[in-house]
Structure formats: C-alpha cells, structure tokens
Image (cartoon, rainbow, N blue to C red):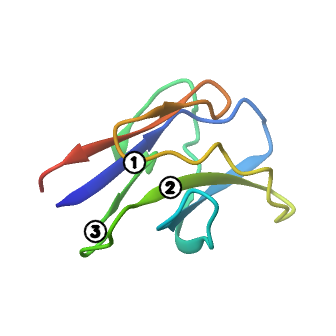
Amino acid sequence: MSVRVYWSASGETDVVAYDIERATTISGPWLPLNTVTAAPNPAIFDPALGQFFTDDPNGTSASFYRIVTVDAAGHRGAPSVPFTAGADVPLADRAHGEDKML
C-alpha cells in the first residue's frame, strides 16, 4: 500500500521547499525521503505543483511522517508534529496524511 501525504503551504513568504521524512517510531530516527518545491501560489492547492508526496513504506512495521520547511537561504524550520497516515496535524494551517491505494 502506498501512502500519499498532502499538506497546506506554510504562511512564511520565504519558504521554497518542504523536506519529507519518515520514521518507524514517533521519536525517530528520521529518514529523509524527498524534497518538494513549494507551490508558487500557496493559497491554491494544486497537486501538479507538488504539494503532496507519495511514499511506499515497503513493509515497514509502522510509518510516521513529518514535514520540514526550507527557506530561500537553505535553513530548515522546526519539523511538523509527527503524524501517521490518516491523522491531521498542524503545519502553518494544517497537514495531513491519507492512505491511498495506487
């Protein structure tokens, strides 16, 4: 089963990307999965602009995710609250994971 993680854009104007990380426990260690470029207009959600990431945990016992903002200078923000697929968590406005069969 694949997991698709969606999130709302950060309210910060200098965010240029989001790092997606996964762990098998809520406290880590965290494995970097991908960096997704921030959408040019954060007020509009458009999957084509990259505000989601699809992961295939490949039999991992439990998967926790978190999202970290990256600003124009390359500085990473504080990570979101860790979440599992299907749980709503805040990231600026909100972020959530959702199970999807692909």
Say which element carries label 1. Answer: strand
Q: In the image, what residue type sits under mark 3?
A: Asp
Image position, residue 21 (x, y; %): 55, 64
Looking at the image, which residue is at 37% across and 62% down?
62
Q: Is residue 93 above or below residue 39?
A: above
- Answer with the quarter of the image where residue 46 lies: top left
Q: Which mark is residue 56?
A: 3
Q: Nearer the viewer, residue 84 or 21?
A: 84
Looking at the image, which residue is at 64% across and 61% down?
27
Residue bearing mark 1: 5
Q: In the image, what residue type sits under mark 2?
A: Tyr
Image position, residue 94 (x, y; %): 56, 28
Image position, residue 68 (x, y; %): 67, 54
Q: Are marks 2 and 1 in contact (CB under 8 Å)?
A: yes
Specify few, some or many for label 1: CA neighbours under 10 Å numbering under 14, 14-19, or 20 or more.
Answer: many
Specify few, some or many for label 3: CA neighbours under 10 Å numbering under 14, 14-19, or 20 or more.
Answer: few
Specify few, some or many for label 2: CA neighbours under 10 Å numbering under 14, 14-19, or 20 or more.
Answer: many
Q: Nearer the viewer, residue 24 or 10?
A: 24
Closer to the chain start, of discs 2 and 1, is 1
Q: Nearer the viewer, residue 72 or 26?
A: 26
- The span from disc 3 to disc 2 (Cα, nearest Å) is 12 Å
- The span from disc 2 to disc 1 (Cα, nearest Å) is 8 Å
Quadrant location of the N terminus in the rendered image: bottom left
Q: With 96 as the anchor, is 68 left or right in this view?
A: right
Q: Is residue 94 above or below residue 52?
A: above
Residue bearing mark 2: 65
Image position, residue 41 (x, y; %): 57, 33
Q: Are marks 3 and 2 in contact (CB under 8 Å)?
A: no
Closer to the chain start, of discs 3 and 1, is 1
Q: Is residue 15 above or below residue 32?
A: above
